[in-house]
């Protein structure tokens, strides 16, 4: 589904991780410490865990359960006992501090400015307790009218269901909303599937010439939202 681009916007929806906030320690650093803490050699790379994360969202009861399932499978695939992977998952949880996050540049000012003109919503893949800790840590607990924890409240992104849930609560149509995120495969693809215009804020400066799927708008930083691109189209 593609989003209409001529209707005025009355709702702005956001992703959380690496769009509004970022961990102070990278997943690679935390995973390295987790292997050391569990007393095992490197079983898999951080990118492997990232690529498999979404496969476990719907069937996991918590983020701890998700990691144990995922790390257990990855350990078995690497020729180790499942218990080794579970031990690494437990060590990862002990090393990862959900409050050790910082807002990205411009976040408070952008949300305050947009909140005066638009209804704001949050659609984030992640455990509700974990994501709420991040929001509290960066002072955004009350920044959004509604939040959907995709993968727990609904199917995970890029499924259109979490976007539809937020729009229903905000009482608006897909054509009158935009979604802001950093991931092409999760955020841009999910917004397109829901018929919502997408605003892509790339996590790295080396932006591909032809991003796939193609976002409706591409910004250099979140601070650029103080001058919304949909007002210029």
Image (cartoon, grey):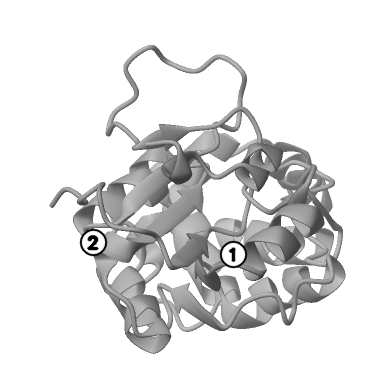
Instruction: Name the residue at the left extreme.
Output: 1
Label 2, on which residue? 194
Position of the C terminus by quadrant? top left
Q: Is residue 68 left or right of residue 2?
A: right
For residue 15, say whether it is visible.
Answer: yes
- Residue 80 placement (x, y as % from top left): 50, 48
Q: Residues within 10 Å of mark 1 (few under 14, many from 20)?
A: many
Q: Nearer the viewer, mark 1 or mark 2?
A: 2
Above or below, 174 against 29 in this view is: below
Residue shown at 34%/24% (left/top)? 211
Whole-Å distance between the Cαs marked 1 and 2?
36 Å
Residue shown at 83%/65% (left/top)? 138
Above or below, 50 against 117 in this view is: above
For residue 38, say whether it is visible.
Answer: no
Mark 1 or 2, nearer chain start? 1
Q: Residues within 10 Å of mark 2 (few under 14, many from 20)?
A: many
Label 1, on which residue? 86
Above or below, 101 against 173 in this view is: above
Residue shown at 30%/54% (left/top)? 190
Secondary structure found at label 1: helix
- Residue 205 placement (x, y as % from top left): 62, 18
Which one is in front, 196 or 19?
A: 196
């Amino acid at each position: 589904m593609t989003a209409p681009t001529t209707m005025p916007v009355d709702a702005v929806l956001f992703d959380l991780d690496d769009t509004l906030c970022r961990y102070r320690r990278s997943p690679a650093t935390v995973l390295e410490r987790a292997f050391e803490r569990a007393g095992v050699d490197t079983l898999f790379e951080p990118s492997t865990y990232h690529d498999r994360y979404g496969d476990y969202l719907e069937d996991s009861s918590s983020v701890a359960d998700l990691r144990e399932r995922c790390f257990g499978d990855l350990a078995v695939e690497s020729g180790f006992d499942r218990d080794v992977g579970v031990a690494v998952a437990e060590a990862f949880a002990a090393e990862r501090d959900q409050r050790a996050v910082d807002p990205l540049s411009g976040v408070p000012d952008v949300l305050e400015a947009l909140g005066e003109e638009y209804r704001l919503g949050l659609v984030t893949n992640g455990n509700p307790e974990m994501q709420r800790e991040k929001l509290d840590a960066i002072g955004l607990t009350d920044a959004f009218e509604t939040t959907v924890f995709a993968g727990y409240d609904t199917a995970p992104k890029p499924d259109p269901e979490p976007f539809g849930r937020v729009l229903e609560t905000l009482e608006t149509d897909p054509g009158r909303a935009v979604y802001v995120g950093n991931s092409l495969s999760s955020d841009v693809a999910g917004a397109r599937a829901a018929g919502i215009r997408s605003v892509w804020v790339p996590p790295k400066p080396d932006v591909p010439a032809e991003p796939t799927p193609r976002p409706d708008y591409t910004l250099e930083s979140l601070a650029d939202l103080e001058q919304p691109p949909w007002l210029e189209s």
